[in-house]
Amino acid sequence: MREAIVPGPADRFPNMLRGQISKVPFVLKHEGTLAVGRRILGTLSEELQRLYLPVVGTRFSFFCPCCEYVGPFLGVRGQKHCQCPRCGALPRHRLLRLVLDALLEQRPPGSMSILHIAPEPTLQRWLERQSRAYVAADLAHGLQVNSFTGQLAVVCDLRRLPFQDRSFDLVIASHVLEHIKEDWPAIQEIYRVLAWDGIALLPVPIVAGDLTIEYDRPHPREQYHVRAPGLDYFERYREAGFNVTVRSSAEFPEAVPDLCLRGSNQVAKRREADVAQAERRPAQRVPPDLSKTRKQSEQAHRGGQS
């Protein structure tokens, strides 16, 4: 039985607005005054849609696996039928929830210890109730994870996790690694804290086709990503010793309803919500020499470009 736990409208909008206001100094520095206004107006516009769309309705109705809402979805940044008006879930959140549902069905209920990096509000409270032990971690200070217990997220850097080896059965870091320039130490750390038969869900937005593009500095028009990941990005997980299975929207088309309306060919082409399911190899008792493997890979890549 799927459990629906969602933030109420009275809590959600102030949190959204506070999130945009907290970014004002950074946006002023990198994008200018007009960008600040656009961001705040965009938040107000989305909230107005959230209020009137379920009342007015449309001829389309969709199901959100994160909160079990049934009805029309909001449009976001030109993408129709994108965001759940109840819990705020986007296609990447819905796909991640569907992958988690399939994964947790294979394990005894409440048997997994979970590390959740940069926890999504649409998933964190549900995950806490599904786990034996749940730990949230983030760079931000004072991030509240559980509104009942007041538990706070562990403040840490993904490149230097303060946890013992093989501490977790499941690690989730959704759309995090594209923000970290030195991503290799972060991947190493995820491998280190994962149990021998553990699984890491490490989706990144696949927006660059086959080959990853590295940026010299954070890109202001791409949520300050330091790279545009391509399909080859998942090879970095394999280099770290993971078995990798890519779960895409073609497997769970209900996660991206806009593309379902256009046909299955469009669903297959949409890759930015893909979830890389990386499993630590149970038979492998000695971690690979990650620094050597990465260095060889970079040299081979440079050699292929020359």
Image (tube, helix red, strand yellow):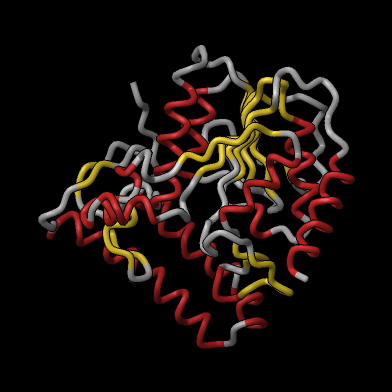
Residue 206: percent from left, percent from top: 53, 57
- Who's the residue at 60% across and 76% down the image? 220
* Residue 121: x %, y % from top left: 49, 45
Q: In this rendering, does residue 61 appear at all? A: yes
Determine whether, in the image, residue 219 is placed left or right of residue 44: right
Quarter the C terminus occupies: bottom right
Above or below, 245 against 220 in this view is above
Q: What residue is rendered at 20% in x and 60% in y?
A: 53
Q: Which residue is located at x 23 percent, y 53 percent?
A: 263
Q: Is residue 208 left or right of residue 84?
A: right
State which quarter of the image contains the N terminus: top left
Is any atom of residue 50 visible in this view? no
Q: Quadrant of residue 293?
A: top right
Above or below: residue 190 compared with residue 26 = above
Above or below residue 277? Residue 37 is: below
Residue drawn at x 43%, y 26% is 102
- Along the line of sight, the residue nearer the viewer: 50 or 114: 114
Q: How many marks?
A: 0
Residue 287 quadrant: top right
- The answer to which of 62 and 52 lies nearer the viewer is 62
Q: Residue furthest top?
A: 108
Q: Position of residue 74 (x, y in %)?
A: 28, 59
Q: Position of residue 189 (x, y in %)?
A: 78, 39
